Amino acid sequence: MSKTTFLTTLSLCIFLLAACKQAPETKSEAPKPDMAKIKAEIKAIEDAWAAASNAEDVATIVGFYADDAISMNDDKPMLIGKAAIQKGVEEEMARHKENDKVVFETLDLYGDENRVTEVGKTTVTDSTGKVIYTGKYMAVWEKRNGKWLTIRDMSNDDAKEAPAK
């Protein structure tokens, strides 16, 4: 093989190898959601939910749920869909004592700009401010048509303290 043929073949091989070498993948990271903003939005909804609960405003409470929502509450059957959830809220309101006040506190929130899971705490006080009971909840929120709606929620009361002997 002549020197020229050898150099031409070598150059061609180097050229082909360079052409076949894949460009390194560049990972474009999606922008991280502004969780502080989302948490503030959910907190505002929870405050409105508590106000509606304190006013026994069933329609407003049910409006926070998606049509296909599922709600799972302490010692009760699963409620599937808005009609079942509305009936459950009405039953709960019938047991409400006048002047009891509920407050929701968001403890943790994670997800993205379209769906988040909230972990929270419920505190109910009587007219004097004495804590009647506390509980905890998880809610999955989904943004639909620009509005956060609850698609799943689960809650239960904390254990009651035994009376002092």
Image: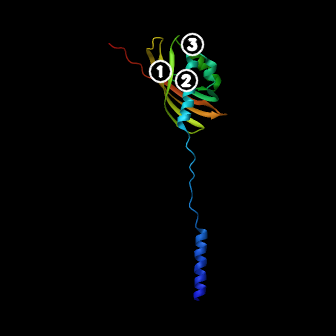
Looking at numbered disc 2 in the image, what kind of residue is underneath it? Asp
Looking at numbered disc 3 in the image, what kind of residue is underneath it? Ala
Where residue 26 sits: x, y (%)? Answer: 57, 56
Where residue 62 sits: x, y (%)? Answer: 62, 23
- The residue at 57%/80% (across/down) is 10
Where residue 17 sits: x, y (%)? Answer: 58, 72
Q: Quadrant of the N terminus?
A: bottom right
Q: Quadrant of the C terminus?
A: top left
Up-down: is 122 above or below 117? above
The residue where tag 2 is placed is: 47
Question: Quadrant of the rendered structure where residue 20 is?
Answer: bottom right
Q: Residues within 10 Å of mark 1 (few under 14, many from 20)?
A: some
Looking at numbered disc 1 in the image, what kind of residue is underneath it? Thr
Up-down: is 57 above or below 37? above
The residue where tag 3 is placed is: 94
Where residue 129 sits: x, y (%)? Answer: 45, 14
Please state if 4 lies on the left or on the right of 156 as rendered: right
- The residue at 37%/17% (across/down) is 162
The residue where tag 1 is placed is: 123
Hey, which residue is sitting farthest left in the picture? Answer: 165
